[in-house]
Image (spheres, rainbow, N blue to C red):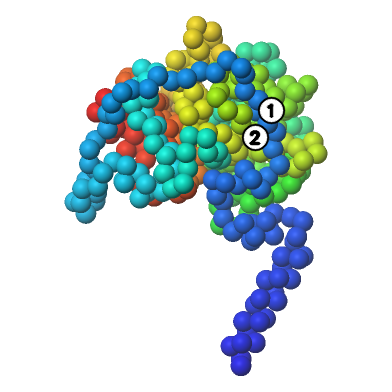
Amino acid sequence: MKTHNKLLFKIILCISFVLIFNSCQVSRFIFYNFADIKDYKIFPSRTLKNDSVIFYFSKSITEKIPEYITTSNDKNISFDNYLEFNKTVAFIIIQNDTIKYEKYFNGYDKASVTTSFSVAKSATSILIGCAIEDGYIKSVNEPIINYIPELKNKNLDNVTILHLLQMTSGIKFNESYFNPIGDAAIFYYGRNLRKAISKMKYKSEPGLKFEYSSGNAQLLGLVLERAIKTKTVTQYFQEKIWKPIGMEYEGSWSIDKKKNGLEKTFCCINARANDFAKIGRLYLNKGNWNGKQIVPESWVTESTKIDTTNGSKWYYQYQWWITNKKGSYMANGFLGQYIFICPAKNLIIVRFGKKDGKIEWWQFFNSIAEKY
């Protein structure tokens, strides 16, 4: 009887907790339980409209992949089964503008939408480069308080756009995805990103230490919104990237609320794997798209070079992950969303999944690239 009463008490307590917080991120965290690649369905968003001119990769007649993968326990498993076992939903290998391998798993197909998670950080970085080229932003060395004055007099006056890009801002942010009242939950499930940003605090001096933080990427989003003024971040992305590179499908960018919402620039572009591959092609070609310079070449170079000055880590630059010291790099999102680029082999790999599985994907991508 005591056990029954305890269980009933816990149920009542849980329900009460949800009712108390039914309008905030805590209840949504509890209800949805954990982030998922279908989360684009639960958030309001702005549509990314495509153009009538669509770019298509060529398709190779024969696949070029390993026949078998040897697992850690020395068992051979087919390449397809290996990907599927590790919760992959889409896997594409493209070399010289030709698709060498394209498969979908676990109920997904070419037309299936997935959310990007932190792949959106790399896209946000692209837009910062475009905004500098267009004159909306003076340079990466501008203090962020030029655009976010509500952060003045909080020991954040010396934080620059560069610090945000390199994740060396020193701004306090809890990146935990398991804490319903932590910063990540507030930013992901909350409905007022601008208010959350205004409460961000000093942790350490900028330019001293790399510390991965979704807060930095979201600050870049607000800088963008304030800089471009007359259009939303989604509209700017559509104008500068989505239409010019010939996306096959419409996409979307999740926002925090329906009315006057702000794009979740740290996480949430929603699209098809094949279209995400085109972002890889854009950077593989140094920002040039079929003869037209869409993104400044200098920006692509700066974004993906190895730099260890001013607290920066060699493996991270301008919201892109550097996978080796031979020039390969990638956009990387939570639960295993990737756009991998290997300039030496003129190669792009896109992997999207329900979970990471049991693979160090960056190593896997590098090993595949070596075989081409």
Looking at the rendered structure, the kind of residue marked 2 is: Trp
SS at mark 2?
strand
Where on the picture, by quarter, is residue 231?
Answer: top right
How far across and down, in percent of the image, does residue 228 sit?
73, 21
Separation of residues labelled 2 and 1 (CA atoms): 9 Å
Between discs 2 and 1, the one toward the N terminus:
1
Residue occupying the point 62% across, 43% down = 40
Q: Residue furthest top?
A: 291
> Would residue 18 be seen by someone viewing this image from the given angle?
yes
Where on the picture, by quarter, is residue 226?
Answer: top right
Where on the picture, by quarter, is residue 135?
Answer: top right
Can you say which quadrant of the picture contains the C terminus?
Answer: top left
How far across and down, in percent of the image, does residue 160 sit?
63, 28
In the visual, does 21 lie left or right of 2? right
Residue 308 lies, with reference to residue 98, above or below; the image says: below
Q: Nearer the viewer, residue 215 or 16?
A: 16
Mark seen at residue 48: none
Looking at the rendered structure, the kind of residue marked 1 is: Val
SS at mark 1?
helix
What residue does disc 1 label?
233
What residue does disc 2 label?
253
How far across and down, in percent of the image, does residue 59 sit?
37, 22
Residue occupying the point 71% across, 70% down = 15
How far across and down, in percent of the image, does residue 153 sit?
75, 37
Q: Nearer the viewer, mark 2 or mark 1?
A: 2
Q: Do the residues bearing badges 2 and 1 touch, measured as CB atoms within 8 Å?
A: yes
In the visual, does 109 lie left or right of 132? left
Q: Label 1: how many residues lie within 10 Å, few (<14), some (14-19) or many (20+)?
A: many
Residue occupying the point 77% across, 40% down = 258
